[in-house]
């Protein structure tokens, strides 16, 4: 863009734009070239690409996803492999490292250009060690030191983060919510329910690193026993597998959650009622969040968002009924813009923020 275009887009004065461009040029981050536009000479500012690569690795119950990007957060490569449930950490880590090395080679680069890696792992994570804690949906990964394991094989700095937190960061940084949004909740519903919290424009971890474990908030005090040891947790009602189990009781066996979603979209009344009833439990949890942290936006991700307002409208109704009126009016409840890719985008954004300095610290 020209100086004039930058001034119009940013709302800054021409003098401020000139000073900022001069400073960025001195740092080698932008270049200024003369061009003729509409018969006039113009000084055009362009970003100088920074050399180097970063990676985000997402570890899931049945998949591994590896993404590679340059330091401007442009995705260079992205691959995924499907694995058996409860896969072994040692095998999965070796598989992932091999995928990443192939990606770097295919990009015409070398491993020496890799600045660092962000690992998206299922929570909860210990705030000090960043290891997966008991209660995770992936019991074989509990207490595994992911940072050390990946650092040993890759010899680059590694940062381990909760996957829902990365999803929140991806939606916040790349979604279209406007500059006024500073408080966002990202809720992903799969075999478990996790949330990432952006408060005051920053990722919020809590005192011990487990902020956002919304799946273990109690919605029925005398409800069924949960894997965490408590009763009546949200996960016992609103995760996709529990909906499928309930529907088996009501109308016969369904093979997959995709069957439930497809039939609900087609109008099958029992499937629609199962989703609507469980969405009201989600609404109770979201209403409590609204009363506690007063978010601007709550976004839902996961397979169930394919049913759209069949899931979201009951959530909105419960929030309107149970949240403080001003909090209910302030919140926007919608499906995530990027869904599962939000975790990739958030991980790459965090990797660039953390490792894109000229001399990144080894924080593995």
Image (cartoon, grey):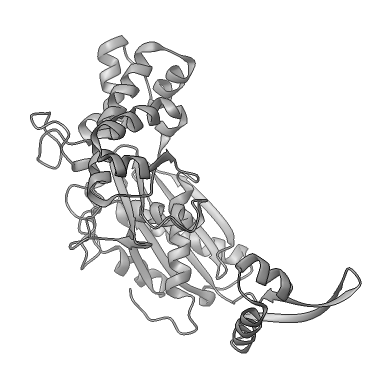
Q: In the visual, does 128 lie left or right of 82?
A: left
Please give the name of the residue rendered at 44% of the width and 58% of the height, measured from the top-left corner.
346
Q: How many marks?
A: 0
Q: Is residue 280 above or below residue 111?
A: above
Please give the name of the residue rendered at 17% of the width and 36% of the height, measured from the top-left corner.
233
The quarter of the picture where the N terminus appears is: bottom right
> 334 or 64, which lies in front?
334
Q: Where is residue 303 in the image (x, y as percent from the top left)?
A: 42, 34
Going by the picture, which residue comes out furthest to the bottom? Answer: 26
Please give the name of the residue rendered at 42% of the width and 21% of the height, measured from the top-left corner.
259
Q: In the visual, does 39 lie left or right of 205?
A: right
Q: Quadrant of residue 277?
A: top left
Q: Position of residue 262 (x, y in %)?
A: 46, 21
Q: In this view, does 83 lie above or below 243?
A: below
Q: Where is residue 205 in the image (x, y as percent from the top left)?
A: 26, 60
> Is residue 121 something that shows in the picture?
no
Please give the name of the residue rendered at 42% of the width and 58% of the height, measured from the top-left corner.
57
Q: In the visual, does 111 lie left or right of 270?
A: right
> 231 or 326, which lies in front?
326
Q: Quadrant of residue 264?
A: top left
Q: Position of residue 323 (x, y in %)?
A: 25, 38
The quarter of the picture where the C terminus appears is: bottom left
> Is residue 82 something that shows in the picture?
yes
């Amino acid at each position: 863009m020209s100086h004039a275009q930058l001034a119009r887009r940013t709302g800054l004065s021409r003098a401020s734009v000139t000073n900022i461009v001069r400073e960025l040029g001195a740092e080698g981050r932008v270049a200024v070239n003369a061009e003729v536009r509409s018969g006039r000479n113009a000084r055009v500012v362009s970003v100088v690409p920074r050399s180097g690569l970063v990676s985000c690795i997402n570890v899931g119950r049945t998949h591994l996803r590896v993404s590679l990007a340059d330091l401007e957060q442009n995705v260079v490569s992205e691959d995924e492999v499907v694995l058996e449930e409860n896969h072994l950490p040692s095998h999965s880590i070796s598989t992932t490292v091999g995928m990443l090395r192939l990606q770097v080679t295919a990009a015409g680069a070398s491993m020496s250009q890799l600045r660092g890696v962000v690992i998206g792992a299922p929570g909860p994570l210990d705030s000090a060690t960043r290891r997966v804690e008991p209660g995770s949906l992936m019991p074989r990964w509990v207490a595994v030191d992911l940072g050390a394991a990946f650092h040993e094989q890759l010899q680059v700095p590694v940062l381990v983060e909760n996957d829902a937190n990365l999803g929140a960061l991806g939606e916040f940084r790349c979604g279209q919510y406007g500059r006024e949004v500073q408080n966002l909740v990202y809720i992903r519903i799969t075999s478990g329910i996790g949330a990432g919290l952006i408060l005051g424009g920053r990722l919020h971890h809590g005192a011990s690193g487990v902020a956002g474990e919304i799946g273990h908030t109690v919605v029925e005090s005398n409800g069924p026993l949960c894997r965490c040891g408590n009763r009546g947790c949200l996960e016992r009602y609103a995760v996709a597998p529990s909906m499928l189990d309930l529907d088996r009781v009501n109308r016969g066996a369904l093979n997959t959650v995709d069957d439930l979603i497809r039939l609900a979209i087609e109008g099958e009344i029992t499937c629609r009622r199962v989703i609507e009833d469980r969405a009201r439990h989600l609404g109770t949890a979201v209403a409590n969040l609204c009363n506690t942290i007063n978010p601007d936006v709550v976004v839902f991700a996961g397979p169930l968002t394919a049913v759209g307002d069949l899931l979201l409208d009951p959530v909105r109704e419960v929030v309107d009924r149970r949240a403080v009126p001003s909090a209910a009016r302030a919140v926007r409840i919608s499906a995530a813009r990027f869904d599962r890719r939000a975790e990739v985008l958030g991980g790459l954004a965090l990797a660039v923020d953390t490792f894109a300095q000229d001399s990144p610290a080894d924080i593995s």
